[in-house]
Amino acid sequence: PGSQGDPAERERDWSTEGIQTHAQPLITEGPCGLVVAFTLQGAGFDVLVNAQHLHDWGITAEELAVTAGQNLGAWSDGTGWIDEDSGDRRLRSSESGTGRDAARILLPAVRAGLAAELQRGAPPGTRVLVGLPDRELLVAGALRPADHEFAALLHDFVMDHSASADQPIDRRLFELQGDDLVEYTG
């Protein structure tokens, strides 16, 4: 909501679209209405991909999305997780400092891995909650059926972190349901 960009799915003639001045970044919609932008990482800065890039590279938006997904997957496979336990509460987070951490949730293998890890040894009915407060943090936690406070505490953390983030993503709390990321409703 409120993100400006050029929808990557829109039909267009890339040969003329890319040569506009002040080209908007290409964006697409991710799960739960999350805005997904494509970036090139430089030393100390990122460049948002726009139609000019596609024109120069001679590729389509679909090819960009596939390549970006493969690159994110390769990076994610080589990047660890932080595990925290406090009593019966379990958290798993990604905070590498590269700006790719929240984007990991787009990968089916990451969603499956989070669910498997956080539900391992947990009682039946344990749910997996996810927060994406900024580009540099993905946090997921196991919501056990008897822990009535955990969801509110995690949501407060996501809201507070997002409010002070340089590059906030979303203040909502999400849930993994199978392979799908959905908004948590309680």
Image (tube, rainbow, N blue to C red):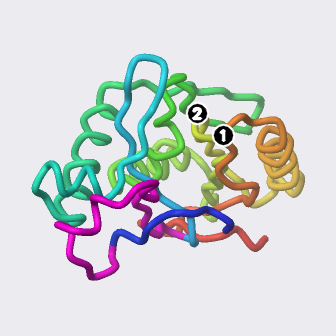
Q: Quadrant of residue 16?
A: bottom left
- Distance Cα–Cα, label 1 vs label 2: 8 Å
Tell me if 170 is positioned left or right of 135 in this view: right
Tell me if 85 is positioned left or right of 11 in this view: right
* Extreme residue in the top direction: 43
Q: Which residue shows up at 54% across the image and 50% down it?
A: 119
Q: Secondary structure at mark 2?
A: loop
Residue 73 % position (x, y): 28, 42
- The verdict on residue 10 being magenta is yes
Above or below, comparing residue 161 to residue 123 in the picture? above
* Extreme residue in the bottom direction: 11
Q: Which residue is mark 1?
A: 167
Q: Which residue shows up at 63% across the image and 65% down it?
A: 125
Mark 1, other Cα within 10 Å: few <14 / some 14–19 / many ≥20: few
Task: Tell me the quadrant of the picture where the N terminus can be found.
Answer: bottom right
Q: Which residue shows up at 51% across the image and 32% down it?
A: 99
The answer to whether mark 1 and mark 2 are in CB contact below 8 A is: yes
Tell me if 78 is positioned left or right of 59 in this view: right
Q: Which residue is mark 2?
A: 136
Specify the segment rendered in magenta. Answer: 9-31
